[in-house]
Image (cartoon, grey):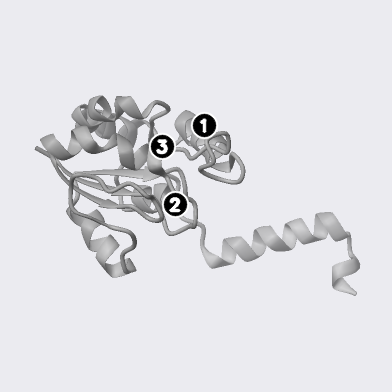
Amino acid sequence: MARILVTVGMGPWPFDRLIGAIAPLCSDHEVFAQTGTSSLRPPCPHEPFLPADDLGKRMDEADVIITHAGNTVRLVQRSGRVPIAVARTSALGEMGNDHQVAYLRQEERFGPVVAVWDVRDLPREVARHGERQAWLLKERPLPPAATPEHIVEVMTSLSARLCGDAHDR
């Protein structure tokens, strides 16, 4: 039995497809779901939103984190773990565009993430998460986070390329 945290983020878009798909996990594992604006209520402990410190504590305690393909993906990766991620899609009314799909496709190719495109695959991915996580952390390490100095350097370089020397006048 795994301790699983499911989180859909803090935005206004419901993610009923993901929340509805966790029912089989709730019967076999210890699951807590942050449901956001979903109209569905899963058969496990859940809350619409959590304070950041509570979410962080639950992330630390979880064996597996299932998340939308948003900022939480990188948050989990920065903690040295591999998230299982499901992208919201505009075609299903889960998001205004498909930036989560594009982001997850990129992460799936190069980053330490388990991308799930069919939510019926969640139980299988949870079952094999330990071995997948070990392999992904070894084969696709996350580069170090950018320092503030590096960000300033990149922005200065970008500004110079876009504006020429005009920004120096």
Q: Residues within 10 Å of mark 3 (few under 14, many from 20)?
A: many
Residue 112 visible in this rendered orientation of the protein: no
Question: Which residue position holds label 1?
Answer: 105
Which of label 1 and label 3 is nearer to you? Answer: 3
Q: Earlier in the sequence, mark 1 or mark 3?
A: 3
Q: Residues within 10 Å of mark 2 (few under 14, many from 20)?
A: few
Question: Which residue position holds label 3?
Answer: 86
Which residue is pictured at 75% across the width and 56% down the height? Answer: 158
* Element marked by disc 2: loop
Percent of width and height locating residue 88: 48, 40
Q: Residues within 10 Å of mark 1 (few under 14, many from 20)?
A: some
Question: Which residue position holds label 2?
Answer: 144
In the picture, residue 65 is in which quadrant? top left
> Which of 138/52 is in front?
52
- Establish if 25 lies above or below 33: above
Percent of width and height locating residue 4: 20, 45
Which residue is pictured at 53% across the width and 34% down the height? Answer: 106
In this image, 128 relative to 86: left or right? left
In the picture, residue 53 is in which quadrant? bottom left
In this image, 149 relative to 84: left or right? right
